[in-house]
Structure formats: C-alpha cells, structure tokens
C-alpha cells in the first residue's frame, strides 16, 4: 500500500506524507456507514440539514488562516485567491441552507382525487427525495470550492445524501484538514455517523464508484478521467447517475465594432482572463475570434504585449505541467498556427508554465485549436467577415461558456452570434469574461458534451437537483405522507390541482 504525498508545486519537493492510500476494506466500511446514515440524515428534515450546513460553514470559516496556509503551500494559488475561494465555499454552504428553507426544490405537487376528461383520477402527491449516498471527486484547481467542502458536497448534503469524497492528489493535506474540521462540526450538529467520509488514492476512487451503496457520482476533471469512471459505472449491475464537468474551450467573439471602440483594452483583459490562476480554470477562454484588419491588429498587439509582460506561472502539479508543455507545443506546431508572444522564462524550479499567445486564421482552423489546453495559453482566430466567422463557430465543440464582446448599443451581430452559440454553451456572457462563476439561483455551470454530460449544473442552487429523485404517493393516508405533501402544510411553494400555491 502506497502513501499519499503532498507536494509543494513552487519547488516540486515533497511537503509531507498525508495518509496511506485507502484500502478496499476501508472503502467498503465508509460506504456502508454512509448507507446506514442516509435515513437519519433525511429525518433531520430541512431545518436540521440547514443547521448542519451552517455549522459546516462556520467551522470552515473559523479555521480560515490554517486552511488557506495549507492550501497555498500545496497549490501555489496564493492567499488572496484562496481566501476568496474559502469565502465562496462558506457562502455555498449557507446558500443551500436557504434553499432548504425556501423549499421549492422539492417540486411538491398534489392532485386531489376527482373526475377528469380521461375518467376518475386517484389522489396523487409527488415530491423529490434523496437519491442516497453520493461519491464526490475533488477538482485539482479548486481545493475548497470544488473539493471536500465544495458545492457538490453542499448540494448533496442539502438533498439529504451522505457524501464520501475522493480527495484530489493535488491537495491531499488540504482535503484532510477540511474533512477533519467538517467531521467534528457535523457530529456537534447532530448529523449521524457516516454523513461524511473521505478516501485517498486512485484505486480507492475506483472502488468507491463501483460500490453498491453509492447512488450517484459528482466529478470535476478531465474527459479521460470522467470516461474511466463511466466505464466503471457501466460495469455495475445497477448503473448510477454520473454528473461530470469535463472539458471546455469557452470561445470568445470580439465584434468588429468592439475591436474598433476598445481593442487595446479588450486585448489586455483577454490576457488577464486566460492567465488568471495560471490558466487553470474550466472557464478559461481558450479561443478568441478577432476580426481581421487594423482594429484587430491593435487588439492582438495589446495581447502580445501583455503576454510578454507576464512571468512564468506555477501549475498545480507535475502532471498538469507536463501536459501543458506537450499540448501547447502541439498547438504551436499545428498547421497555420503562429506563436506571436511568450511570457517570462521559467526559474527552473517547481511545476512552471510559460504563458503563450498563438494566432491562426478562422477560415482554416486546425482541429488541435478546438481542444482544451489546461494552462496559460490561448489562440486568436482572425476572421475576415461574418461568413468566415459563422463557418468557424459552426465547427466549435460545446463549452461551458461562450462570450460576445460587443460595441456600444450593438445588437444585430451579437444576436446572430448568440443564436449560433446557444446550441453549444450553457452560459452566454456579454461584455465580460467567463472566468468568474457567481454562485446564485440563476447560475448554470454546464453545457453539452464534452463540457458536461448532465443537464443539471454543478454551481448554483439547482445543483441540488442532481441528487434527488421523484416519488409519487397514490391514495396514501395522511399519516404516511411527508409533511410537505399533507393538505394543511403551507411552508413551501406547491402546485395543488394545477395551481401554484405560495407559502403563507
């Protein structure tokens, strides 16, 4: 059995041994405990789980300095970024407490018995219930918000589902620390034993997904990693839902009017977006469509200047650094692609990457530039007229986001571009950049394959929908119904005999 090691990406050196890899026997014990905890977690009710989520947020917040210190040591993301991420993480937990209290997520509906054009109808009452224990896979690039205390965990617990987290190898010490903090808080809040569990190691992750107690999987990572887990799921006697956030190019279209009005500003902002966090965001703009001609030239010149002024950046782990070097070299070597700027030289220590700016013609884009490259590189595709632009957009893979940068009061071209991109993106962004993802009721963080394989988001309140399933009670006596489906209950929005009834 191997040890799980924490590295310092700034130096490439081992920081500490965190834990042994989790054995198959321990995975089985944790999954059995999660299964046993599921009824009691559901019975806490919406108020009890809301209190639990707030207790977890308070506990993580109380350990802010220590968590940020450990996370910075093993991710090199910096204290400013990580403090912001911890704030977001606690906000997510508290937001799902509000979701529970508001209650519309249950989709509660009552159809009383009566006559219909199809004949007599029985009494029918429907709402969503917890799906069961959930496996959550932490993401490399968000050691807090998409990891042990992250949105998948928060939404699953809110739904009433125990969670077993597979700690990411990029930040095992952070994962262990957050888990310990949360476990103590969960126990103090009255959550049943087995509500939270954690495993370490690749084989443990595979064993987790294969375990019969696990009823759904939340995953943020590469297409290859997601497909490997899907193969395991397909081999189960009872395949389960897999909610994967996988790969995204996030194209940006700069209209000719926008380039003419603020081309240099857009150029600088684009570089800021694709180098943010060393380009390790799932929403990083990997391809920007910029018009041909002098206005577009000034925009690209501003991008090149900004890239040359950006130093080498530290990546999360050795594997990501090696992959970045290989893929970005392949992009630069592709037919018709020119490298127009590089960032500062690396120091030779740790897992570093040199920012790169590449340019190609939108009329003859090689397929390589339509694939995601994790790290600080972006391709500018120069388009000569709308016909060439729309032909190139038609060949784009689906993404989490698509962005339109418009001129002042410009509508016609942005509308046409929006209609083209809406079929292949989950979030359309205007006159801003996609790298920030607000956590809210209206947010969607998903898109057609290969960005995700799910219609339900991993960010925002509808993330809870992934871990719920519908049940209908037909002709049920009142004493067997959930409180939310009894006639006299008025605490949440419900649809009664086809009419939406608000709480009072």
Image: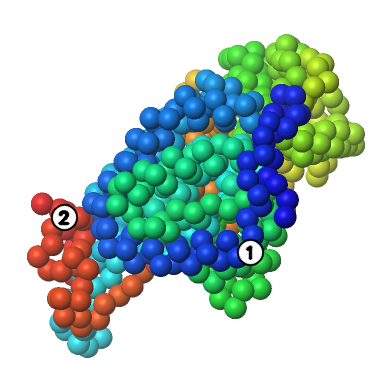
Image quarter of residue 414: top right
Q: Is residue 291 left or right of residue 113?
A: right
Give the labeled residue for mark 2.
Answer: 491
Can residue 184 be seen here? The reply is: yes
Is residue 473 placed above or below 159 in the rendered structure? Answer: below
Using the numbered discs, state the Cα–Cα distance from disc 1 to disc 2 in whole angstroms: 44 Å
Q: Is residue 160 left or right of residue 456?
A: left
Label 1 crowd (10 A; few <14 / some 14-19 / many >=20): some
Q: Which mark is residue 438?
A: none
Can residue 355 be seen here? The reply is: no
- The colour scheme of the drawn protein is rainbow
Q: Which mark is residue 24?
A: 1
Is residue 220 placed above or below 388 in the rendered structure? Answer: below
Looking at the rendered structure, the secondary structure element under dot 1 is helix
Q: Quadrant of the N terminus?
A: bottom right
Residue pictured at 50% horizontal, 30% vertical: 67
**Position in image of residue 163 (x %, y %):** 46, 55
Furthest residue in direction bottom, as rendered: 119
Is residue 425 placed above or below 491 in the rendered structure? Answer: above
Residue pictured at 59% horizontal, 37% vertical: 173
Image quarter of residue 494: bottom left
**Position in image of residue 101 (x %, y %):** 24, 49
**Position in image of residue 13 (x %, y %):** 75, 29
Q: Is residue 147 left or right of residue 52?
A: right
- Which mark is nearer the camera, 1 or 2? 1
Looking at the rendered structure, the secondary structure element under dot 2 is loop
């Amino acid at each position: 059995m191997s040890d799980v090691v924490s590295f310092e990406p700034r130096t490439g050196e081992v920081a500490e041994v965190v834990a042994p890899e989790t054995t198959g026997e321990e995975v089985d014990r944790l999954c059995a405990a999660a299964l046993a905890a599921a009824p009691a977690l559901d019975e806490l009710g919406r108020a009890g789980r809301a209190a639990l989520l707030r207790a977890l947020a308070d506990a993580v917040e109380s350990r802010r300095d220590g968590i940020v210190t450990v996370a910075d040591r093993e991710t090199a993301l910096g204290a400013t970024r990580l403090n912001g991420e911890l704030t977001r993480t606690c906000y997510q937990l508290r937001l799902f407490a509000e979701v529970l209290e508001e209650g519309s997520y249950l989709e509660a509906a009552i159809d009383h018995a009566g006559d219909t054009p199809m004949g007599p109808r029985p009494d029918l009452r429907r709402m969503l219930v917890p799906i069961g224990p959930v496996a959550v896979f932490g993401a490399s690039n968000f050691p807090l918000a998409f990891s042990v205390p992250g949105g998948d965990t928060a939404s699953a617990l809110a739904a009433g589902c125990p969670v077993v987290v597979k700690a990411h190898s990029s930040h095992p010490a952070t994962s262990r620390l957050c888990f310990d903090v949360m476990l103590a808080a969960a126990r103090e809040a009255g959550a049943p034993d087995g509500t939270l569990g954690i495993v370490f190691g690749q084989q443990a992750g595979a064993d987790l997904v294969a375990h019969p107690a696990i009823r759904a999987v939340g995953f943020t990572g590469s297409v290859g990693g997601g497909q490997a887990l899907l193969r395991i799921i397909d081999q189960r006697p009872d395949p389960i839902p897999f909610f994967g956030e996988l790969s995204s190019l996030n194209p940006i279209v700069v209209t000719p009017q926008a380039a003419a009005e603020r081309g240099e500003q857009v150029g600088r902002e684009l570089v800021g977006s694709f180098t943010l966090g060393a380009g390790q965001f799932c929403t990083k703009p990997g391809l920007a469509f910029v018009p041909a001609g002098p206005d577009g030239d000034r925009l690209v010149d501003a991008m090149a200047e900004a890239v040359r002024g950006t130093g080498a950046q530290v990546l999360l782990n050795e594997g990501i650094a090696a992959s970045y070097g290989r893929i970005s070299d392949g992009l630069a070597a592709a037919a018709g692609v020119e490298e127009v700027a590089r960032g500062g030289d690396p120091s030779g220590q740790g897992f570093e990457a040199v920012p790169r700016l590449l340019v190609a013609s939108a009329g003859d884009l090689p397929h390589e530039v339509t694939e995601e490259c994790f790290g600080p590189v972006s391709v500018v595709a120069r388009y000569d007229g709308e016909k060439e632009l729309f032909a190139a957009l038609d060949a784009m893979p689906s993404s989490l986001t698509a962005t339109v940068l418009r001129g002042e009061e410009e509508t016609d071209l942005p509308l046409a571009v929006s209609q083209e991109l809406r079929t292949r993106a989950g979030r359309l962004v205007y006159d801003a950049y996609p790298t920030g993802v607000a956590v809210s009721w209206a947010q969607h963080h998903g898109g057609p394959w290969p960005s995700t394989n799910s219609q339900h988001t991993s960010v925002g309140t509808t993330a809870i929908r992934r871990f719920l399933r519908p049940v209908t009670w037909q002709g049920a006596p009142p004493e067997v119904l959930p409180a939310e489906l009894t006639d006299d209950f008025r605490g949440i929005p419900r649809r009664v005999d086809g009419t939406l009834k608000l709480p009072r």
